[in-house]
Image: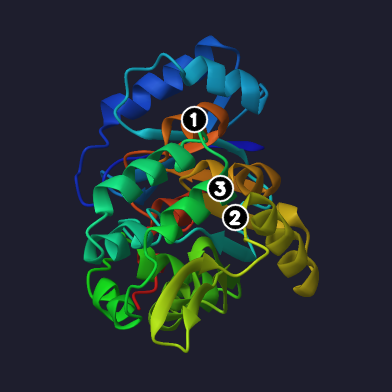
């Protein structure tokens, strides 16, 4: 069987039923697929259904109208376990937007958050939106970075995703349009091999100037990082899994062998082929064929 459908529901929910699997199976068969083995990756949470006889595109179309409250991901079976993880940070590896939290200390969170939402949905130019938001932080004490960091929470499954992939020989990279103060902390705590982000400029290391070091790391920088890290690790971009939620992640997601829109903004959902809206970050392990009993808990 050369193709696999992975069904994923919320962690520990037990929501994935035999009936849901039967519905998906029937939809594939009705459109000419020959189905084979069904394998539980985590009972009641995630499973693989192997099949052949149709294209990925035809299978996805067949599943579009299935009334299944689960993430439905169709892939080629061969090569699904990846050797490079490249991940966005804000609203992906961490639950919120670190710039928005920083802006809260300057009393401008609502203004900054509104710009962030539009930029991440692709409605504003990323660099111009970043400059405008950071400009509102001019004069803020650098000490507030530490205070903002205390509010950061990791997305469910973040530690397990990184630990499991690294234990199995993958290189893990955190590439963000946010700031290196936060990415370096996330890298250390979650065990990433590499991080890359923008740099906030300061006045004598004590106060923020309201400016970002140029050139700004934008969507192209994420693509460049993917290509460079793949080459440095002796692999191709097809051997990478990329994950993000914002418009500045779309090119990276499109280029990677497995590109995942994770609880993403509407414009990203509309363009990404693989979308995770039910599962947490361990969904990226299920997509690669890892069963729960193979997860490494950091």
Callout 3: SS: helix
The reply to whether residue 88 is in sight is yes
Q: Is residue 92 left or right of residue 155?
A: right
In terms of depth relative to the viewer, which is nearer, 237 or 264?
264
Q: Residue 86: give x, y in percent of width and height.
A: 58, 61
**Residue annotated with mark 3:** 128
Q: Earlier in the sequence, mark 1 or mark 3?
A: 3
Disc 2 to disc 3, C-alpha distance: 29 Å
Q: Earlier in the sequence, mark 1 or mark 2?
A: 2
The reply to whether residue 38 is in sight is no
Disc 1 to disc 3, C-alpha distance: 19 Å
Q: Is residue 296 left or right of residue 34?
A: left
Q: Is residue 126 left or right of residue 70?
A: right
Q: Earlier in the sequence, mark 2 or mark 3?
A: 3
**Residue annotated with mark 1:** 267
Q: Residue 123: give x, y in percent of width and height.
A: 50, 32
Q: Nearer the viewer, mark 2 or mark 3?
A: 3
Q: Residue 73: give x, y in percent of width and height.
A: 50, 36
The 10 Å Cα crowd at callout 1, few under 14, some 14 to 19, many 20 or more, is: some
Q: Nearer the viewer, mark 1 or mark 2?
A: 1
Q: Residue 230 is drawn in which quadrant?
A: bottom right
Name the residue: 60% across, 75% down: 169
The residue sitting at the top extreme is 30
Label placed on residue 241 = 2
């Amino acid at each position: 069987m050369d193709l696999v459908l992975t069904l994923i529901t919320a962690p520990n929910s037990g929501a994935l039923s035999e009936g849901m699997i039967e519905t998906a199976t029937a939809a594939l068969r009705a459109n000419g697929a020959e189905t084979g083995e069904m394998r539980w990756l985590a009972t009641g949470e995630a499973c693989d259904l192997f099949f052949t006889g149709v294209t990925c595109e035809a299978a996805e179309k067949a599943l579009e109208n299935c009334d299944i409250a689960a993430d439905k991901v169709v892939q080629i079976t061969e090569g699904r376990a990846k050797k490079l993880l490249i991940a966005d940070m804000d609203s992906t590896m961490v639950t919120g937007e670190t710039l928005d939290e920083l802006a809260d200390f300057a009393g401008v969170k609502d203004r900054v958050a509104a710009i962030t939402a539009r930029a991440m949905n692709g409605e504003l130019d990323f660099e111009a939106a970043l400059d405008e938001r950071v400009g509102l932080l001019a004069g803020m004490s650098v000490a507030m970075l530490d205070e903002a960091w205390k509010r950061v929470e990791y997305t469910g499954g973040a530690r397990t995703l990184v630990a499991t992939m690294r234990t199995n020989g993958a290189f893990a990279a955190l590439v963000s349009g946010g700031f290196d103060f936060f990415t370096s902390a996330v890298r250390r705590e979650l065990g990433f091999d590499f991080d890359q982000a923008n740099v906030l400029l300061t006045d004598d290391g004590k106060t923020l100037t309201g400016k970002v070091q140029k050139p700004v790391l934008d969507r192209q920088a994420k693509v460049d990082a993917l290509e460079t890290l793949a080459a440095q690790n002796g692999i191709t971009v097809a051997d990478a899994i990329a994950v993000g939620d914002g418009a500045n992640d779309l090119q990276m997601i499109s280029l990677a062998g497995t590109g995942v829109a994770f609880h993403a903004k509407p414009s990203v959902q509309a363009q990404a082929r693989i979308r995770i809206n039910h599962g947490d970050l361990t969904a990226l392990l299920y997509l690669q064929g890892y069963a729960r009993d193979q997860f490494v808990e950091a």
